[in-house]
């Protein structure tokens, strides 16, 4: 049993070692860039008086 | 051990272990609440509920990272074995911390939703088919589910009920939970927070966990490959008598790859399965204490004569016949039926 368990361990961590960094990089690359100079938006209607 | 099931069998070591653990978690949370508000951009304040979910979330991530490091560290260096001893309490506490994080999230982000908070969690964001804006909470829910199931089945009752192989396989789901946590953090705080320091910490944690597991796996594979194929009439040479220190064992393998430990105690030799019947710990890395072979992981004990735990306990190990060929220790790789009494082999005088 232990040998099967060891082999399963090795397979799982090999897959994770390749897959996780890739997934993390893809996720971070796909994140939208924050726009530094976004004009402020007024939520109250101009001239609404209040 | 197996004589009676109590909710938790406490002893001094476990109490010290848990005290360190709780103090560490308390200290981390206190420091987080104290320091984190001062590290953000000037003029931007973080509300208390958000601070709470971040504190507990980051704490759960770090705890899970540490838990996953314990196994390979104990394989690579015996000095980490004491940390392995009470790892289950570590896991249960991590599940509680993660659950607190989840409750804080539900209370803050989904408390005023038109549907119940849990329903809103799954339906508020349905961008499942794009990476940017993916509902990363789903990975957190999966990981939390695994941690809770593991915590609920962490007791020895479940270990006994499910049998160690099934229980071990079930608990390997923690690796998937870790992968889910990494995706939860990456698609959530890392992708939306634009915080390079946090990205660095998460990436470094993942690198440490993955590297340790790969190194431990490589070491075990090298050990498997290193076991000799020295056979004689079906018997396997496990090693040389002079290699076995008093009260210790050497480990070899049967042709199928199952490991066998040969212990030396008071001028006698005994061959047992290397797999502890409690949690499959490496018996051969333990020692003989008070005449009993003692597992290095949780201290389960077995007699040299028949591989059985002393009464009233009921655990049993497979035993093997052995003989000496000069100073070579030869083992019959066919295991004897559980409980078979085989007197340990006396080492002839003048033999190393």
Image (cartoon, coloured by chain):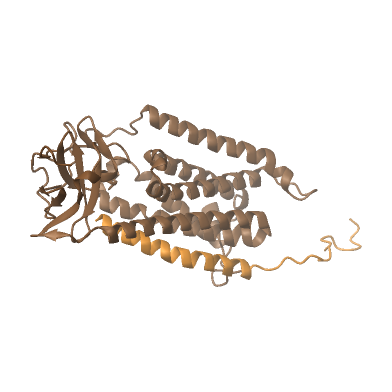
Placement of B217 over or under B288, stated as above or below: below
Q: Quadrant of the C terminus of chain B?
A: top left
Placement of A2 over or under B249, stated as above or below: below
Q: Residue at x 60, y 44 (%)?
A: B55
B70 sits left or right of B112 in the view: left
B98 sits left or right of B197 in the view: left
Q: Residue at x 53, y 65 (%)?
A: A21
Toward which corner of the image does residue B33 lie, by quadrant? top right
The residue nearer to you, when weighing B13 against B39, is: B13
Q: Residue furthest bottom?
A: B129
Q: Residue at x 33, y 56 (%)?
A: B220
Q: Quadrant of the N terminus of chain B?
A: top left
Residue B324: percent from the left, percent from the top? Answer: 11, 48
| Rendered colour, chain B | brown
| Numbered circles on residues, count | 0
Instruction: Let me know if residue B270 appears in the view.
Output: yes
Q: Residue furthest top?
A: B12
Q: Residue furthest front?
A: B350
| Rendered colour, chain A | orange
Instruction: Let me know if residue B133 appears in the view.
Output: no
Placement of B20 over or under A8, stated as above or below: above
The residue nearer to you, when weighing B47 against B156, is: B156
Residue B206: percent from the left, percent from the top? Answer: 52, 57
Residue B78: percent from the left, percent from the top? Answer: 38, 43
Toward which corner of the image does residue B193 lie, by quadrant? bottom right
B204 sits left or right of A48 in the view: left
Residue B221: percent from the left, percent from the top? Answer: 33, 60
The residue nearer to you, when weighing B115 against B10, is: B10
Placement of B328 over or under B295, stated as above or below: below
Toward which corner of the image does residue A5 lie, by quadrant? bottom left
The residue nearer to you, when weighing B127 against B259, is: B259
């Amino acid at each position: 049993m232990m040998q099967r368990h060891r082999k399963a361990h090795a397979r799982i961590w090999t897959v994770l070692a390749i897959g996780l960094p890739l997934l993390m990089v893809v996720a971070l690359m796909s994140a939208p860039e924050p726009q530094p100079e976004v004009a402020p938006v007024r939520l109250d209607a101009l001239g609404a008086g209040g | 051990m197996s004589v009676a099931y109590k909710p938790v069998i406490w002893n001094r070591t476990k109490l010290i272990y848990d005290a360190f653990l709780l103090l560490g978690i308390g200290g981390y949370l206190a420091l987080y609440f104290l320091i984190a508000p001062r590290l953000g951009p000037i003029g931007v304040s973080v509300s208390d509920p958000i601070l709470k979910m971040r504190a507990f979330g980051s704490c759960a991530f770090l705890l899970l990272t540490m838990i996953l490091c314990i196994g390979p560290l104990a394989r690579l260096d015996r000095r980490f074995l004491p940390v392995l001893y009470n790892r289950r309490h570590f896991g249960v506490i991590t599940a509680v911390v993660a659950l607190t994080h989840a409750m804080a999230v539900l209370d803050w982000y989904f408390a005023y939703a038109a549907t119940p908070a849990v329903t809103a969690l799954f339906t508020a964001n349905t961008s499942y088919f794009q990476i940017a804006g993916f509902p990363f909470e789903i990975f957190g829910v999966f990981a939390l589910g695994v941690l809770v199931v593991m915590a609920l089945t962490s007791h020895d009752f479940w270990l006994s009920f499910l049998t160690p192989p099934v229980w071990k396989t079930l608990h390997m789901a923690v690796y998937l939970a870790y992968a889910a946590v990494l995706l939860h953090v990456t698609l959530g705080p890392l992708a939306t927070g634009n915080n390079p320091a946090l990205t660095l910490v998460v990436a470094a944690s993942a690198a440490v966990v993955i590297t340790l597991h790969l190194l431990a796996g490589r070491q075990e594979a090298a050990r498997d490959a290193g076991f000799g194929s020295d056979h004689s009439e079906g018997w396997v040479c496990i090693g040389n008598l002079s290699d076995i220190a008093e009260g210790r064992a050497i480990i070899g393998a049967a042709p199928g790859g199952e490991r066998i430990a040969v212990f030396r105690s008071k001028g006698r030799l005994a061959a047992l399965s290397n797999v502890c019947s409690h949690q499959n710990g490496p018996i051969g890395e333990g020692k003989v204490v008070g005449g009993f072979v003692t597992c290095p992981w949780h201290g389960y004990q077995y007699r040299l004569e028949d591989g059985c735990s002393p009464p009233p306990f009921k655990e049993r190990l497979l035993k093997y016949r052995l003989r000496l060929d000069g100073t070579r220790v030869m083992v019959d790789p066919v295991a004897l039926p559980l409980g078979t009494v085989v007197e340990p082999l006396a080492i002839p005088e003048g033999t190393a």
